[in-house]
Image (cartoon, grey):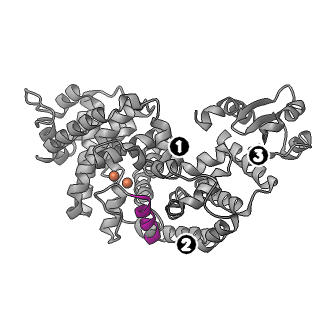
Amino acid sequence: MELKDILAPLEIELKKVSLLGGSMAVVVVPWDQGDMAMRAKRETDTALRCGDYLVIGVFGLGGDEASSQFLSIPKGIAVFPKDGPDMQTLFFEAVERFNLSKGSAPWVKSLWEGIKESASMDTEGDGEAKFMGSAFYQFYAFMAAHAPEMGRVVGQMSQADRHWIEDLLPYGLVRDLPSREGGRDEDIERLMQEWGYQERLERKRDLGRGTLRKFRNIEHLFTLPSISQEIIALAEDDMVAASRMAKVIEKDPVLTSRLLKVVNSAFYGFRRQIVSVEHAVVILGNDEVVNLAFSIAVHQIMEKIAPKQAALLWEHSLMVAHLTQWLGGIMGCSSTSALYTLGLLHDFGKIIFLQRGYTPSDYVSLSSLEELAHEERETGLSHAEMGAFVAERWNLPEDIVDGLLGHHLPSKAKDICLAVAVHASDAIAHLGALDLDRLNTVAVRHLVPDKMAQLSAEVVAKRHEYIKARVHTLLDM
Ligand SMILES: [Fe+2]
Ligand SMILES: [Fe+2]
């Protein structure tokens, strides 16, 4: 079960409190002192177990008052509205304070503080902060390169903290982490200090701001053709009539002729000629036509800014778009309309880097942690953050921006289902198979065991082949 599901009952209480404008203290105490804590709990308060902790939602109290209520128990306290907008943030704030008050080893403390800081950066500061703060790949790559030490660090953490760190790493690595071994505390502390977490994070942020400043005003990159904006706006309305949709598309003759060419190709295999956009909308449906029109518009931009690399990346983008649509359906993601676009744009950041002469990770293979760290060292952000930045400039829906940001790091996404769908589809497109070891740990937690029955090696390989064949008929035109 996911943390947010465990905390769901408290989330409901928090919503009520925030509607009424009151306050709520979230108190985290060690589970083995639960009895004592339950004696201090009042009738109106809610309590539930979360891993090694007992979590109590105390209503109408500030931090000091809540603290005095649980006087004799070691605890962490976070208070709404000051410490966080949602239950998960409040919970982690409280756990963090609990860990600090417990006086854990300094290296665990500094590790925890660093990760917490980069995890919370997207909630503060200006609009660009979220693109710099959503990930710190250099650090994740550093952790991956020091697996024995990491094993020791996570081996001594509680379940909740442990998940948080493991979810940043590839599953193949987490599965083999040696636990509670591999070095003394002093060695690990020195390792962390020598690496210089804080300085590197600051350098990354400065660099990232500089990069975004350079890219911010490139007109042709950041103005999605207005026709695409109109199409996307229409797509939000399920009931829009075919004639209205056709009218918008037909304003652009190039788009219209390309669209008609595609719908009459072997890709769709219709026997009768489709002669008008309206006809295409009636036969294919709104969603399909929107996806097509949007793909054509994106391809035009891609070709314009990086013609040499566009072809390979375009094929990969189409593969991932179709795979994400399929996988997101199996996974039951709620936001189905975002799936295709998300897959189509997932590596758009690479194209942007290429046109400015940056060398992104090898743009035709699955990005490793080390490659993402390399992009970040050079520019301050990875292609995932860059692509999300552009998507936001295009005014694309928030769930798409968020999914792009999290396509290599789904644990940081708001809609984990969407991010896992595109993350796993990217891997399938590259490898032709679903290799769990190459996925991020949170993706594996999400897919196993619920969905794996529907994703046998045979099913995945067949679907990959099928989509590849369809994409090729499209590309041959
Ligand atoms: Fe990517
Ligand atoms: Fe990719």
Residue 23 seen in render: no
Residue 465 rendering spot, x and y as whole percentages: 21, 39
Residue drawn at the location 49% of the way across and 46% of the way down: 441
Q: Which residue is mark 1?
A: 414
Residue 450 rendering spot, x and y as whole percentages: 46, 29
At label 1, the amino acid type is Lys
- Helix, strand or loop at mark 1: loop
Residue drawn at the location 26% of the way across and 50% of the way down: 316
- Going from N to C along the chain, the mark reached first, 1 or 3, is 3
- Where, by quadrant of the figure, is residue 183 drawn? bottom right
Marks 2/1 in contact by CB < 8 Å: the verdict is no
- Going from N to C along the chain, the mark reached first, 3 or 2, is 3
Q: Which residue is mark 2?
A: 203
Spatial CA span between label 1 and label 3 = 21 Å
Residue 9 rendering spot, x and y as whole percentages: 68, 29
Span of residues in magenta? 368-378
At label 3, the amino acid type is Ala
Judged left or right of residue 66, residue 5 is left
Q: Which residue is mark 3?
A: 78
